[in-house]
Image (cartoon, grey):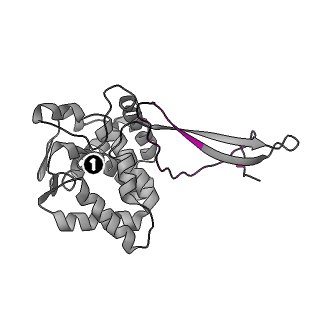
Amino acid sequence: MENVGCVTYRDQFVFREKVSPSFEAGVAHTFLHEMAHMWFGNLVTMQWWNDLWLNESFADWASYFAQAELDEGKLFPSAWNNFLVRKAWGYRVDQSSTTHPIEVTVENTEVCETIFDGISYSKGAAVLKQLLFILGRPIFSNALKNYFTKHGESNTVFNDLITELDEEAKRQKSTFDIWAWADRWIKSAGLNQLEPVYEKDAKTGKITSFSIAQTPAMDVHATLRDHKLNMQFIDASGKQGDLQ
């Protein structure tokens, strides 16, 4: 349990013998997640439960980000693979009838416990990882620095963080519309399916055209969203290919 300036753990996290790498990585994730709450949740605290993602999504993302950065990734080389496994939690919840946006209306404290789920944790963390990839580290990190400086020891809402991201993006000459992104990713439920669509030359077998088709995974949540991707093409022999 994270408390301001003091995180407490159960005995199972204080192991005295050699443990498996997966268990050690799981413990590191918990340690770093709770430590992240010293900033995301304690230094700056959400005003109400509908912005739980300002606490939990950030803490989950920060934990894996820190693992991947530690000792240039040598200490936990599978950090992002473990992150991908955890994303399955978000995928599963986001395809259920009880799914909800990352930022969700919470009527009272009796309801708040229902949103401590794969949406507020793993989907929210994945969305933040994508945002970092879109904006780049300078914009993202500077915006967070400004956010903590301006709102330290106070309460925030959705618009406070998005404002800092938007202003920093503009300062660094980015034309990306962070408000439209937030509406589609943070304020809308559901997920998208991405499918490669391509044509090949019948004689050479080389790809002549390529695109990504995006569709909603559930018709009831039909929002289409911005995606920035790195792609690698590999031929049948395992060699990296290209689009020529």
Q: Name the element at disc 1.
A: helix
Foreground residue, 207 or 11? 207
- On the rendered structure, is 86 left or right of 48? right
Q: Position of residue 182 (x, y in %)?
A: 35, 52
Q: Is residue 88 magenta?
A: no
Characterize the magenta stretch by its predominant secondary structure: loop
Q: Position of residue 233 (x, y in %)?
A: 67, 47
Q: Amino acid at mark 1?
A: Ala
Q: Is residue 233 magenta?
A: yes
- Give the answer, above or below, for where 177 lies relative to 190: below
- On the rendered structure, is 160 left or right of 96? left
Residue at the (45%, 57%) spot, across then down: 133
Residue at the (17%, 42%) spot, across then down: 49
Question: In the displayed image of the protein, which residue is found farthest to the right?
Answer: 203
- Which segment did they paint magenta? 213-242
Foreground residue, 218 or 46? 218
- Give the answer, above or below, for where 241 lies relative to 90: below
Asked if residue 68 shows in the view, the reply is no
Question: In the displayed image of the protein, which residue is found farthest to the top?
Answer: 97
Residue at the (35%, 57%) spot, across then down: 179
Question: Which quadrant is the N terminus positioned in?
Answer: top left
- On the rendered structure, is 79 left or right of 50? right
Residue highlighted by disc 1: 59
Q: Position of residue 125 (x, y in %)?
A: 35, 46
